[in-house]
Amino acid sequence: MRRLSKPTVALITLALAHTGRAAEPVTLDEVTVTGTREAQAIAETPASVGVIITKDIDELKASHPSEIMGTVPGVHVNVTGGEGHMTAIRQPITTAPVYLFLEDGVPTRSTGFFNHNALYEINLPQAGGIEVTKGPGSALYGSDAIGGVINVLTRPAPLQPEAEVSAEAGGHGWRRLLLSGGDSDSTGTDGYRGDLNLTHTDGWRDTTDYDRQSATLRWDRFLDSGAALKTVISAANIDQQTAGTSRLSKQDYLHNPTLNYTPVSFREVEALRISTAYEDETQDSLLSLTPYVRYNRMEILPNWSLSYDPQRYTTENTSVGLLSKYRRDFAPRRSRMIVGLDLDYSPGSYQENAIDPTRVGAIYVSYTELARTYDYDISFTSVSPYVHLETSPTEKLRLQAGLRFDYMHYDYDNHLGVQSSGAHRRPASTDVDFDHISPKLGLTYALSERLNTFAAYRNSFRAPSQSQLFRQGQAENTVGLKPVDAHSYEIGLRGQAGPGSYEVSLYYMRVEDDIVSFRNTVDGTRETQNAGETLHRGIEIGLETPLTASVQLDIAYSYAKHSYEEWRPATGTNYGGNEINSAPRQIGDVRLSWRPALLKGGRLELNWEHLGDYWLDDENTHRYDGHDLYHLRANYKVTTQLELFGRLENLTDERYATGASYSQFRGEEFAPGLPRTFYAGVSYHWR
């Protein structure tokens, strides 16, 4: 077997060998690959990082990202239909582009073409691990990484031939087939893995069926020079009839939750990513080059705007990019320098047609397509050099500093001409440039072998996406939107107590020129604006501890407050001092797992999921009360190769909302969440 590079060993270790719990607060020798894009001990990472390992992805058999992402303290992912989602990490529950989604370190989408449903473009049920770095991304990441960075790892090729098939079924027509297999040659030079995910559900609400086909191919090759190549091809095709966050009146929410007011709405998504990572490591240096290409296409009839701006649109883009990095280690004080350059060129297009929907009672039953309101080409280019430095003045103290410069350019070509009035205004063809310098400082200090503390300042920003800039709507000027600028301060403590581990982190983040959508409370229309200033502060606590030899307790909890410090969206309207809507103060996830001998290595898990109350409007006049859900999951190992599994979601059949809002125009509205639903399946593993 050829010698593997340290980053490759770390990835294989994280993906295959780790036997801890999902999203452990930390064991201090655990490694992460997000912070510096390669292996790094969490004890020397000045940030709060949650790690979800392969073993727990396999055991949980999640049907939606929400069922597993909550194991990380301070992380909430809701359901918007199918595998669609909105995310809350140090931010309200939002569709805003404040998160950076990666697959093996490669962004899944261009900054200019962000989509909040990014996780459904990744084959999450067959992932090799998930890392969540909370708060602004380091100097090694650019725009969008304000709330956090989510890095999904692919599984490496197995050293010996293996194959696995997993089939499951559940309520509301749920069916899923997972196929996986791979091998390495006799010399260990080449290894291959393929994963296939075929999923269907009829949906529990009317006209909400969902289909996905996802595939991941990975080829690991070790060269005679000692360098390594990793090629990953990922593809996803999604066809969804969606209620999404289509909300119901309170009366229908309570008494007729399967109702879907917008059965005409749909979302069709195609995604393809190809990347090859080249790593050449010596004793004190590493050269890493990752060229990639991407293709994203989405055709959608959105349900949320049918009442005030009915439309059908298609957005499409192709990307070519390069992630390059050189790392040099120096013996004095374990010093390290990383320099890098990220390049991205993403040409694309946007076409939109107005539609005239037909409504029978509360239900939109059909529509007629009208004139085209937007038709433009858009090219997004980014050039981002960065530098990252580390050193240890003493054995226990580790210092980090970084600086990143981002230059971003939009080339916008309007095919329909200028429109300066009405609900679908169009700016003239133009170029828009943004640039930003993002510094970071951090330190970790080992109080003992089992106790570690960290502190960090991180700056990040978010350039407006292409739709915010050039789909003007009725706003007077969107081309003039400014980037969002975030300043984050964080301190934390993590360690081990007996056989258990814990982490506590406190953060304070001030966001300037936040981009939000102002909704007119009278007619329901919306306008995108820079919102002045918002403030986000909170505490996150993670704990895992074995109660007995076979019983374990895992707790993820956060308390936060998200508020407007300054926002005057219209004459006579001032939201300064108000809390942001859809921003629960409390998020909790508690899991009690039991591994009795009779399950032969399987486990029985009871999960309590808590979401606190939150405001439904920026005026802070109406509240959603929050909810508590309970889930029961079990795995039974019939043999070392055959496994039976099942899960009962929403054990008490609680009526709860995955989204809620209030306006004078429409009153209180709620998107009902999944009722009690049972899933069961079988998997077989050949080795």
Image (cartoon, rainbow, N blue to C red):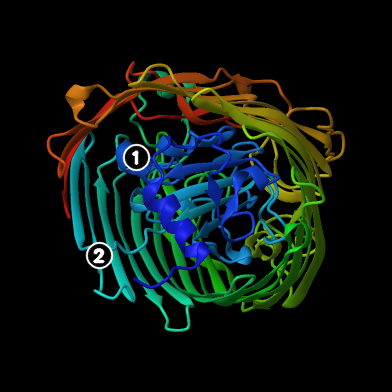
User: 288 above or below 197?
Assistant: below
Q: Earlier in the sequence, mark 2 or mark 1?
A: 1
Locate residue 678 relative to residue 529 in the image: left or right. left
Q: Point out residue 323 in the picture as x, y percentages from the top left corner.
A: 60, 73
- Check the picture and name the quadrant holding the C terminus: bottom left
According to the picture, the residue beneath numbered tag 2 turns out to be: 182
Instruction: Identify the residue at image location x=40%, y=59%.
Output: 154
Viewer-side residue, 325 vs 550: 550
According to the picture, the residue beneath numbered tag 1 turns out to be: 62
Check disc 1: other Cα within 10 Å, few if <14, some if 14-19, many if 20+: some
For the residues marked 2 and 1, what is the alpha-carbon distance in whole angstroms? 23 Å
- Res. 128 visible in picture: no
Instruction: Identify the residue at image location x=31%, y=55%.
Output: 212
Q: Point out residue 497 in the picture as x, y percentages from the top left corner.
A: 57, 23
Within the image, what quadrant is residue 134 found in? top right
Check disc 2: other Cα within 10 Å, few if <14, some if 14-19, many if 20+: many
Amino acid type of the residue that numbered disc 2 sits on in the rendered structure: Gly
Res. 608 mark: none
Judged by depth in the image, the label closer to the viewer, 2 or 1, is 2
Q: Point out residue 490 in the picture as x, y percentages from the top left corner.
A: 76, 38
Total marks in image: 2
User: 482 above or below 536?
Assistant: below
Viewer-side residue, 671 vs 265: 671
- Check the picture and name the quadrant holding the N terminus: bottom left
Amino acid type of the residue that numbered disc 1 sits on in the rendered structure: Ala
Instruction: Identify the residue at image location x=60%, y=70%.
Output: 283
Within the image, what quadrant is residue 342 found in? bottom right
Viewer-side residue, 668 vs 542: 542
Instruction: Identify the residue at image location x=46%, y=51%.
Output: 119
Evaluate if marks 2 and 1 touch, with contact meaning CB atoms under 8 Å apart: no
Locate residue 366 relative to residue 455 in the image: left or right. left
